[in-house]
Image (tube, coloured by chain):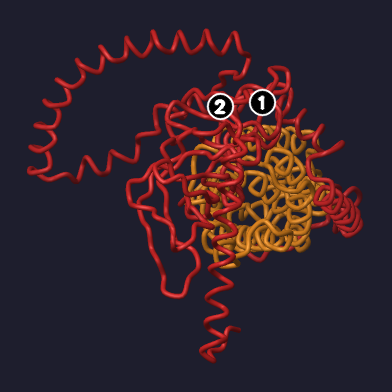
Chain colours: A orange, B red
Amino acid sequence: MQVSDKNRNVRGAVVLAVLCLVLQLALAPNVGLGNGRANFALIFASCVALQVGGTSGVIAGFVAGLLFDLSSTGPIGLMAFCLSVSSYLLGMEQRNRMAGDLGATMALFCASALGVSVVYHLAMLLVGQTSSIVDALFLRALPTALLTAVFFVPFAYYFSRVRAASGGLGAGSIRAGRLGGSRGASHLGKRGL
Amino acid sequence: MPLSSRGRQAGPTIANSRGQSSGGRALVACVAVSLVLFTLSSRMGDEGPFGVVRGAFQTVTSPVRYLGATVSLPFQGLGNVVTNLTADQATLSELQAENEALRARNVELEEAEQTAERLQGLLDLRDANNLQSTAARIISGSSDSWTTTVTIDKGTTSGVAPGMPVTSSGGVIGQVIESAATTSTVRLLTDENSSISAMVQSSRVQGMLNGSVTGELRLTLVGTDQSVQVGDVIVTSGLGGAFPKGLPLGEVTSVENSPGSLYLDIIVEPFSRTENYEEVLVVTSLTEEQRATADDIAAADAQDQQGTAGTTSSTSEGQGDGESTQ
């Protein structure tokens, strides 16, 4: 049986939320790839979903998406919908996916970022914000997904390599006593992989 | 004992056996709430409670946006570093010669700057007396990939309201679309949904200046029988009542007359850029002389009717010649 340090998980999630909110408001508007802007709400939601998952992940995705909608000029609720669904899908199979598995984490996130960007921009297309599906997909959705994936790299590295060795935001349960996962993660962390 | 966490299954933890579920119920609830919010937001726009909540959120978070813009200001020219590193000797020699010429020019410009400051003081005095505009500073760009907007540090408490035009020293940069208490969102000319009544300054030909996803400005609804040349200056026409008449918008860089097309394909380079995070002016009210006159409206109607007549005429000719007009 594992004992999860819930207080530490909550602290970690709050710190991550504040960091992503500040980055979304201060950094994202000033760094662009064509028309693309990094989506730190997606990064936060994905980190929580991959580490904790379940109900917490879905609610984190919903709240992050809602804040993203409020900070932008688009319709409210669209990104909340996208992040709720993506968080559910990312967190439905297993917990602590990021621990010690950078490649798989990046692959999952890239698929999620691409899916969320495409769905978001297609929905904007459907509500009449533009008339060109090519513009929506290739000039907006793809740069957004790419830029978001780039900004996710340090988060993925931290949670999969650095944090996995010390626990937190879900990784505390690894450290606390699950033999296979805990030793594997700690082993990889100590070797600096 | 696995050496890697790959393929690891969730173990029976206290957290996930008691407090954690798969999130199915939460997903259904969140999706339902999201769809309701999305539907209401799409129908109501920024009117009502959604606009109030968004305005309050943007007011609360404006210091963070301001901080980001301030911190990123020194890095705005970072893209030039790669160009500089790869420059060859000929380019460097050319730049040195240009630098000497610019130094001489700089002395002249410093004189001109002092003159401009005095004139600016006069303009400020006139603005203060007429209460037609308010100065603001761009504090942030667009935070999403969908819109080309900037955020300025003036809102409803400063008299800024949606629909007001925004200009820089170079000309019009856009129009206020949302206003919170202390901040406002300005849709730039280059935004895909931007559309402004404009005209060619020299020939007074009228049209609509539209933004695009590629950042280009296109002057539309100008008939092929009208005269537009590369280098012509485009200004606001004042039609519609939102923008003052005669504010500079940009310069024509390309004019194409496609065979069979009713309208010219005109590309315009905007005068104003927001990359430097400059001060802007929000025009809060218009005087009578800034509005379009009855003659301007009549001229626009005449041009429109002329275009319609041309369309009808060419259609009739096509039918007379037995050609398909479908």
Q: Which mark is residue B183?
A: 1
Task: Give me the chain letter of mark 1.
Answer: B
Evaluate if marks 2 and 1 touch, with contact meaning CB atoms under 8 Å apart: yes
> In the image, B185: left or right of A14?
left
Query: Label 1 sits on what residue type?
Result: Thr
- Could you say where residue A49 lies in the image, as x and y percent from the top left? 73, 52
**Is residue B271 placed above or below A170 in the rendered structure?**
above
**Is residue B94 placed above or below A125 in the rendered structure?**
above
Give the residue drawn at x 89%, y 58%. Answer: B28
State the separation of the CA atoms marked 2 and 1.
9 Å
Task: Give me the chain letter of mark 2.
Answer: B
Give A60 or B1, whichever is nearer the viewer. Answer: A60
Q: Considering the numbered disc 1 on the image, is that residue within a helix, a strand or a loop?
A: loop
Q: Give the crowd class for mark 1: few <14, some 14-19, many >=20 residues within 10 Å.
A: many
Q: Give the crowd class for mark 2: few <14, some 14-19, many >=20 residues within 10 Å.
A: many
Residue A1 visible to an observer of this rendering: no
Residue A104 visible to an observer of this rendering: yes
Q: Considering the numbered disc 2 on the image, is that residue within a helix, a strand or a loop?
A: strand
User: How many marks can you see?
Assistant: 2
Give B318 or B54, whichever is nearer the viewer. Answer: B318
Query: Label 2 sits on what residue type?
Result: Ile
- Could you say where residue A61 lies in the image, as x and y percent from the top left? 76, 49
**Is residue A1 placed above or below A118 in the rendered structure?**
above
**Is residue B134 placed above or below A67 in the rendered structure?**
above
- Could you say where residue A68 lies in the image, as x and y percent from the top left? 70, 42
Give the residue drawn at x 84%, y 46%. Answer: B44
Q: Residue furthest bottom?
A: B322
Give A128 or A98, whichever is nearer the viewer. Answer: A128
Give the residue drawn at x 22%, y 40%. Answer: B84
Residue that mark 2 sits on: B139
- Could you say where residue B88 lies in the image, as x and y percent from the top left? 12, 45
The tag earlier along the polypeptide, 2 or 1, is 2
